[in-house]
Amino acid sequence: MQVPSLRLQSAWIRDVETKTMKSLGIDIRVKAIGTHDSSKAWTATQSGKWINSTSILAHVANYACNLEAIHIRMSAAKEQVRLLEDLLSINSNVQDFVLEIDTGLREVYARPTLNLNNLSACNETSSGFRRFIIRAPMCNVTVPDSNRFLRQMSTATDVRIAAYRADVKMKSWQWVLQLMGAAKEAKEFEATFACEWNTALLEDDASPIAMMPRLLDLTLELPELDARLLRQLQAPMLQSSTQFSTFRRFVISVVKSKPMVAFPTIKNEISDIVSKSYEEKGHAKPRVAHVWEDVQTTTL
């Protein structure tokens, strides 16, 4: 893994007028302990970089208070996640948020948890996000107050959340459906979670219709995904768009050993599309682009 010099980034961040910055882009990753022969070797080569990376994030979390765009690449560490939340808490006009969290310092440590309420609280009084992207396969995400978070997605045209697990009060697919319904302006949407946290299933009438009239690119990889979600999705541009091939990136990944439940024929805009889905044990790690076929009726 090669990243820009942390020393240079540290010097730069202290030379610029941080309080007037409108855009922030930093890469503060450090190598994982497992990439070295021993913890002692890691300490000798990386501990200083780790201190530097944390110092950079702490500095901007204290002084960068007028940001409109935040792009950060960082390691999966609980301490830095808290600093990231502090940074978002002092910025009220962020419209472009891109977060990439790389491999953790050490996988034996507890997975960091990203609180999406804290990451989106910056937009309570603003016009909302234009882009909201989180790629954090080593982390969990939690949403204590889904309604507050979902309100921030109403203006976003690009919404992507990829994490290890979503700690929500329902099945992952039901929460994703709520997110899709909130992101009505989205042209690109992705939700990827490797395993389930909550096994409680809301009643069917609690699952809303997701109206996504502008959606062109959809990627889903969930522990459980079937016609119950597809029945509730109304996205006509997926079928009529000249970029129809982008819909092939719609991924179904079933992470369970029991048989798939059969559901009634899907009757909406994507009723003539069915995927070859698979049931397998274990977590969904690599993505597989399943082939889509045109059919007259669809029964999963």
Image: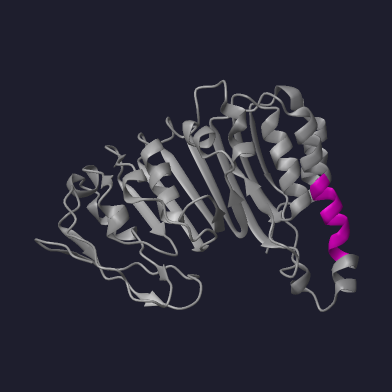
Task: Report the number of numbered marks.
Answer: 0
Q: Viewer-proximal residue, 63 or 197?
A: 197
Look at the picture and state if 258 lies above or below 3: below
Residue 297, image x, y percentages:
11, 61
Residue 9 visible in rendering? yes
Residue 287, image x, y percentages:
43, 67
Q: Which residue is drawn at 48% across and 31% down?
A: 151
User: In the rendered image, which quarter is residue 246 located in?
Assistant: bottom left
Q: Quick one: quadrant of the N terminus?
A: bottom right
User: In the rendered image, which quarter is residue 157 located in?
Assistant: top left
Q: Residue at x 21, y 63 (%)?
A: 274
Residue 246 visible in rendering? no
Indicate yes or no whether the magenta region holds residue 53. Answer: yes
User: What segment carries the magenta color?
Assistant: 45-54
Look at the picture and state if 180 lies above or below 45: above
Indicate yes or no whether the magenta region holds residue 135. Answer: no
Q: Quick one: quadrant of the C terminus?
A: bottom left
Q: Which residue is drawn at 71% across and 22% down?
A: 20
Q: Is residue 122 left or right of residue 283?
A: right
Q: Is residue 10 left or right of residue 197?
A: right
